Amino acid sequence: MTGFPTTTYFAASPIIRDRIVYGLDRRTALIAAMSKGRANSRGIVAEYVEAFYDYDEKRGYFGKPCFDEIVEPFRVGRGLVVPVKPLITIVENGLQVPIFTVGWANFPLTNWQMRLLATIFEDAVFSLTDFRKSPGEFLCFPKVGKGDSAKRQPLVWKRGDFELLSRNELRECLDEFLLALEDAKIILEEALRKEQAEAPVVEEKPMGETPLLDWR
């Protein structure tokens, strides 16, 4: 709850976009992956970028980009929204195609969670007039195999591949999330109070006893 990821794939996004938009060559892309972003993440970023290039050799992205930096809200509750942002949106065969991708080495989502994700995309993006006929595309490159022989393989799905949640299923899910969010706030507040109570007390000196300059 209070922790942060130790690694990040953030640096991969502009590299992959440049591949789709400008045809960035693999060698330059890997140099960028190993020199940009958080140092401890560069290896996994390069691995992810390499997997995308392998997939693109077969897929062959050719569409022109449009709707730069599109971000659409998915409304969870009153005053609470989740921003939904495709990596890039391109025009292919006369259709606007938003492309979503994540760099996870493992893909932990169940079929039900995939249905929820597809429902969120449908509500936030594909409900818009310009995207109602769009196939959309979601990419992930989880590792297949064990140990050193494990290799990233493309996992691709498009709009319509998963049954959307019904209105009641979605509402139940969101209600459960909002309840969990309130519980998390209570746990976090208690953790912060405990941390403050256990923090060492710093004795403050009167202003007259605190030298403004210490030349020692």
Image: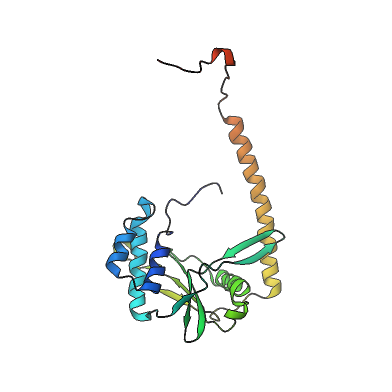
Outermost residue, bottom side = 93
Residue found at x 48% / y 80%: 91
Residue 105 visible at all: no
Task: Determine the residue positioned at 53% across, 80% down.
Answer: 161
Reply above or below: 89 against 78. below
> Compared to 94, does 24 lie above or below?
above
Return the x and y of residue 184 as percentages of the image width and height: 64, 50
Residue at the far left: name it.
Answer: 27
Instruction: Give the position of the C terminus as an image quadrant.
Output: top left
Horizontal relation, residue 171 to residue 109: left or right: right
- Please tell me which residue lies in front, 59 or 63: 63
Where, by quadrant of the figure, is residue 132 drawn?
Answer: bottom right
Q: Position of residue 171 (x, y in %)?
A: 70, 68
Coloration of the structure image: rainbow
Please provide percent x and percent y for residue 51. Answer: 35, 69
> Closer to the camera, 139 or 32?
32
Measured along the vertical axis of the image, is residue 26 above or below residue 11? below
Picture layout, residue 210 above or below residue 103? above
With 143 as the anchor, is 164 left or right in this view? right
Q: Is residue 155 visible?
A: yes
Q: Is residue 26 left or right of residue 112?
A: left
Location of residue 16 (image quadrant): bottom left
Question: At 34% from the left edge and 74% from the top edge, which residue is drawn?
Answer: 23
Picture mark count: 0
Residue 84 lies in what quarter of the image?
bottom right
